[in-house]
Amino acid sequence: MSDLFADSITPDSIPAEFTRVAAYYNGAYAWPREALARFTGGHILISVTGDPDAAEAARCIDVERWDATPEQSPEFVGARFGCGHRDALIYCSLATVPAVLHFNSPTDLHPWRLWLADWTPDGRPPTRADLVDRLHAQYGVTVPAWRIWGCQYASLGSYDASVLYAPDDFTRP
C-alpha cells in the first residue's frame, strides 16, 4: 500500500495496513493527537473550517458541504504559506474544482495542490491523467497534473481510501 492512505472520522476503524492517514484537526470529528501515533508512515491534518489560524497546523482545508467553502480556501492557502510552510492542500470533489479555481488561480505561485474526491465505480484509483481529462471534459477546467496531489477514490464503510500521486510528504509522528 505504498501509494495509499486513509481517512476517517473514527481513527480506530482504519485497518493496520494503512500506515499513512489524513486526520481531522478541528470540528466535531477532530482526532485526539495520540491517535496519530499508530500510523508510522505519517499524517496530514485537515481543517474543516475556513479559519486561517488552523493553517499553522493543518495542511489541508476541507472544501465541501457543511465545511469550508471555495471562497475561504485562498485565505487558508495564504495563511499556510505565511506561516512558513511550503505546502497547502485543498480537498474537494471534482464538481467543486471550478469554484476552487475561481478563487485560487491555477497559475498562482504558491504551490497549493488538490486532494480530489472521485469515488470510482470499480473501487480502483484513477490516474492523475484520468482526473485531468475528466476535469476538462466534464467541467471545462484545466488543471496541471502536478497540482493533483491525491485522490480519495473509495468509501470502505467506516473509512475512505485515497491514492497519493505526489512524493510522500506526510508528516512523521
Image (cartoon, rainbow, N blue to C red):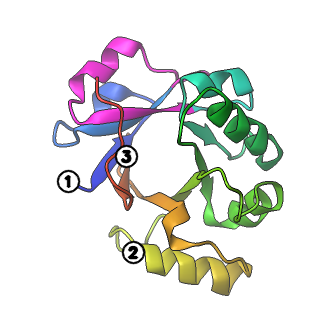
Q: Can residue 118 be seen in this view?
A: no
Mark 1 touching mark 2, by CB under 8 A?
no
Question: Quick one: SS at disc 3?
Answer: loop
Tell me which residue sits at (16%, 42%) in the image.
Answer: 17
User: Where does label 3 land, which residue?
Assistant: 157
Position of 13 with respect to 127 (left or right) is left
Q: Earlier in the sequence, mark 2 or mark 3?
A: 2
Give the x, y percent position of residue 103.
82, 54
Tell me which residue sits at (65%, 87%) in the image.
Answer: 137
Position of 75 with respect to 64 (left or right) is right
Q: Which of marks 3 and 1 is nearer the N terminus?
A: 1
User: Where does label 2 land, which residue?
Assistant: 127
Tell me the distance, in whole angstroms, between the alpha carbons under discs 3 and 1.
Answer: 21 Å
Disc number lying in front (3 or 1):
1
Q: What stretch is highlighted in magenta?
A: 25-46
Residue 144, relative to residue 42: is it above or below?
Answer: below
Using a 10 Å C-alpha cutoff, classify the residue at mark 1 as few (fewer than 14 neighbours), some (14 to 19) or many (20 or more).
few
Position of 26 with respect to 69 (left or right) is left
Give the x, y percent position of residue 95.
69, 66
Residue 140, relative to residue 143: is it above or below?
Answer: below
Quadrant for residue 84, please give it: top right
User: Where does label 1 land, which residue?
Assistant: 2
Amino acid type at circle 2 is Thr
Give the x, y percent position of residue 45.
48, 30
Q: In which quarter of the image is the C terminus?
A: top left
Question: Quick one: SS at disc 1?
Answer: loop
Q: Nearer the viewer, residue 91 or 111?
A: 111
Tell me which residue sits at (62%, 72%) in the image.
Answer: 143
Disc number lying in front (2 or 3):
2
Tell me the distance, in whole angstroms, between the alpha carbons under discs 1 and 2.
Answer: 15 Å
- The residue most toward the bottom is 137
